[in-house]
Amino acid sequence: MILIFWKRLCCFILVLMLTACGVHQKYSQQQTAKLAELSQEDFKDAMLWKKFNVAASLMLPEHRKKFINTFMPLKDIQILAINTLYLQPSDENRRFETTIEMEYYLLPSVTVKTFTFDQIWVYFEGDDPTQQGFLITTSFPDFP
């Protein structure tokens, strides 16, 4: 009788542990997905407010200089909207691909133009604070 009790208790504990692991993994994936969304929103907001250094901080270090050299001289750029046209998560929400559409005009012209570009975001963990969280791993394309 005692042996049956211990077997059932062990099975019960095993089920609880497996359930807890599954909940933790699901929670971690949800946290990562939320962080991905917040990172992308930070990039969009930085672009809209012309905080190009902030936007560049969300890129791998090797891509930041080109991005800053492209946008910092554009004092007359007015970015009207940045929209996500495509979003595809993968690798348990640790990587996602996006297609972004940016509507802008460059003064003195008031003609609204559209610039579409792709980004790949990857989640990084590590000791270096410039390489933590979601970062854009693709080089920013040449701006027209």
Image: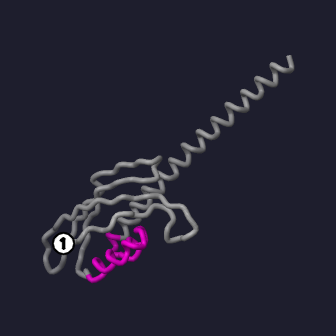
Give left or right: position of 106 versus 123: left
**Residue at image coords 52%, 51%:** 31
Residue carrying label 1: 144
Indicate the quadrant where residue 64 lies. Answer: bottom left
State the residue at coordinates (48%, 57%). 35
| Camera-nearest residue between 22 and 3 | 3
Q: Nearer the viewer, residue 101 or 124?
A: 124
Q: Horizontally, is 43 left or right of 128 in the view? A: left
Task: State whether the magenta stretch is mostly helix, strand or loop.
Answer: helix
Q: Position of residue 10 (x, y in %)?
A: 76, 29
Q: Is residue 134 left or right of residue 69?
A: right
Residue 52 magenta-drawn?
A: yes
Question: How is colour applied across the structure in the image?
Answer: one colour
Most extreme residue toward the front is 62
Q: Residue at x 72, y 28 (%)?
A: 12
Q: Quadrant of the N terminus?
A: top right
Looking at the picture, how far across and down is residue 63, in whole percent? 36, 72
Residue closer to the observer: 108 or 24? 24
Instruction: Tell me: residue 67, above or below residue 101.
Output: below
Tell me the quarter of the picture where residue 20 sits: top right
Location of residue 9 in the rendering, given as x and y in whole percent from the top left corner: 77, 27
Write down the region rendered in magenta: 47-73
Q: Residues within 10 Å of mark 1 (few under 14, many from 20)?
A: few
Q: Residue furthest top?
A: 1
Asked whether residue 74 is drawn in magenta, I would say no
Disc 1 on helix, strand or loop? loop
Figure disc tally: 1
- What residue type is disc 1 on? Pro
On the image, the x and y values in percent for residue 107 come to: 18, 79
* Residue drawn at 51 percent across, 47 percent down: 29
